[in-house]
């Protein structure tokens, strides 16, 4: 799988989860999970989308460093 596709799929899953947690927070009035919501949306959705756009625009010979960056980013927001 291309790095950019991995970023976009991951960002979509994070957006879905983040917004679901946000709806739960709002509807239940239970705010202890605000950090989970914020991280899923900002690091998961927004940052992974930006990473994906960057990696889609970059052509390189060796993808190992790119996968390392994206792998660390994916582990950071979960
Ligand atoms: C259906 C969509 C969403 C709902 C229902 C929702 C709901 C909420 C709720 C209820 C809170 C807690 C507010 C409070 O502590 O008083 C919150 C906080 C937050 N939301 Fe959302 N949210 C949504 C989408 C988003 C998106 C798309 C982002 C970012 C891209 C985002 C980023 C944040 C952040 C950073 C906070 C923490 C704010 C703070 O601690 O002051 N939310 N959200």
Image: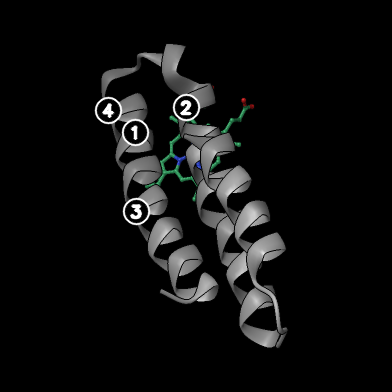
C-alpha distance separating marks 4 and 1:
10 Å
Is residue 40 at least partly visible in the picture? yes
Circles 1 and 2 in contact, beta carbons < 8 Å: yes
Is residue 42 at least partly visible in the picture? no
Counting the numbered discs, the total is 4
Circles 2 and 3 in contact, beta carbons < 8 Å: no
Tell me the crowding category of disc 4: few under 14, some 14 to 19, or many 20 or more residues within 10 angstroms, Cα based: few
Is 40 placed left or right of 46 in the picture?
Answer: left
Residue found 54% across the figure and 34% down from its top: 38
Q: Quadrant of the N terminus?
A: bottom left
Is 71 placed left or right of 20 in the picture?
Answer: right
Residue found 40% across the figure and 52% down from its top: 15
Q: Which residue carries the number 2 mark?
A: 36
Circles 3 and 4 in contact, beta carbons < 8 Å: no
Counting from the top left corner in percent of width and height, residue 63 is at: 64, 71
Upstream in sequence: badge 2 or badge 3: 3
C-alpha distance separating marks 4 and 2:
16 Å
> Is label 3 or label 4 in front?
3
Upstream in sequence: badge 4 or badge 2: 4
Upstream in sequence: badge 4 or badge 1: 1
Label annotation for residue 13: 3
Counting from the top left corner in percent of width and height, residue 48 is at: 57, 58
Tell me the crowding category of disc 2: few under 14, some 14 to 19, or many 20 or more residues within 10 angstroms, Cα based: some
Residue found 58% across the figure and 70% down from its top: 52
Q: Is mark 4 within 8 Å of ligand 1?
A: yes
Q: Which residue carries the number 1 mark?
A: 21
Q: Which residue carries the number 4 mark?
A: 27
């Amino acid at each position: 799988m291309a790095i950019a596709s991995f970023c976009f799929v991951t960002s979509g899953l994070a957006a879905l989860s983040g917004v679901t947690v946000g709806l739960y927070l709002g509807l239940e009035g239970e705010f202890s999970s605000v950090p989970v919501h914020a991280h899923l949306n900002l690091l998961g959705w927004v940052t992974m989308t930006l990473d994906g756009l960057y990696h889609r625009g970059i052509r390189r010979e060796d993808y190992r460093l790119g996968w390392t960056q994206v792998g660390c980013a994916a582990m950071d927001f979960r």
